[in-house]
Image (tube, rainbow, N blue to C red):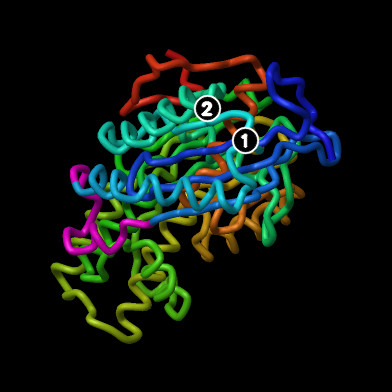
Amino acid sequence: MSSPFSIEGLRPGARILGIESSCDETAAAVIEVVTREAQPRGVVLADVVASQIAEHAPYGGVVPEIASRAHLRAVREVVEAALDAGGGWSSVDAIAVTSGPGLVGALLVGLQTAKAMAWARGLPMVGVNHLEGHLFAPFLDRAAAVGGAPRFPFVALLASGGHTALYRVDSFETVRELGATRDDAAGEAFDKVAKLLGLGYPGGPRVDRLAASGDPNAVPLPTPMRQRDSLEFSFSGLKTAVSVHVQRHGAPAEGAGLEDLCASVQRAIVESLVRKLMAAVKREGVADAVISGGVAANRGLRAMAAAACEGAGVALHIPPAQSCTDNAAMIAFAGAMRLARGQRDGAGLEPRASWPLGRVT
């Protein structure tokens, strides 16, 4: 195994320490960049994530101030654990850190940590767009990945709690947004419906589990943004439809009624995501499709997308669950691709609450 890149100051088989703190997970990872089948891959040597779910659950969502303080408490232990498992400081060639988009206070914790370590160790550092991390997560070498690494060009659906968009990806450097949500992201829609039904936080996984036993056609709900030519998404209308249904019929506490409603909600969201994905693949004339982001762990989405891609002769690539949710291994790999292009950042690197990816302005 050898690195496919010549990165000034980094040895072959470069190892990158990644740090992620954009929202409510404090994460650190160490990857080694290698070549497999003429493509760069990131071999995950260490991957540590400290979740804040228990701290935010009482509030039904992420509280920025609580998130920032939790990152401060966890970051040192998480980074040390990743380094211990990944070979220690002597094996690290560079540092990659999420610099946006995300909660500014949360991002600052990761950024200041990365800056201090890069300065103290004399290591190159690069800031990474969190969305890039998700897009290139299929290039991480892990067990349980669906379809392996994609071939360029490919169309990617990025669906998470904060983002839902379609991209055409021609290379690690060239990404173009094809369409995005006009309001709620898909994961946000799952969470809002779950809160309406009293399912707690995070809502997406709970809806997914209940939907597995329900009838997806039991409750008539609109499929968002059915327009044939649009690659944009909208989920606020679906949330309103569920709210009206609950007002009229009450929120089912348990049993078949709750399972059917969750299954119907999931069908509406997933059908919209898959329809748009397949429309984008056809319009762009590509042979590979990627689904990434936290919602990519949804079993209903995986099943419907697999069936649609098989029917269309399209190769589907979905990272395993630990690469779909926020993690630092994906940040380390995306950072390695930036380092390979000669990019570096210094002490002036600032957090970016908003950082559109591939959008024509």
In the rendered image, residue 289, in percent from the top left (x then y), is placed at: 66, 43
Q: Check disc 2: other Cα within 10 Å, few if <14, some if 14-19, many if 20+.
A: some
Label 1 or label 2, whichever lies nearer to me, is 2
| Residue at position x 56%, y 38% in the image | 17
Q: Mark 2 points at which residue?
A: 121
Q: Nearer the viewer, residue 155 or 110?
A: 110
Instruction: Indicate left or right for 170 with 105 as reference.
Output: right
- Compared to 74, does 39 lie above or below? above
Dominant SS type (magenta): helix
Q: Quadrant of residue 322?
A: bottom right
Q: Mark 1 points at which residue?
A: 92
In this rendering, does residue 104 appear at all? yes
In the rendered image, residue 19, in percent from the top left (x then y), is placed at: 47, 39
Asked if residue 59 is among those painted magenta in the image, a careful observer would answer yes
> Separation of disc 1 and disc 2 at Cα?
10 Å
| Residue at position x 53%, y 65% in the image | 299
Amino acid on which disc 1 is placed: Val
In this rendering, does residue 272 appear at all? no
Secondary structure beneath disc 1?
loop
Asked if residue 154 is among those painted magenta in the image, a careful observer would answer no
Q: Nearer the viewer, residue 158 or 277?
A: 158
Q: What stretch is highlighted in magenta?
A: 51-65
- Compared to 187, does 230 lie above or below? above
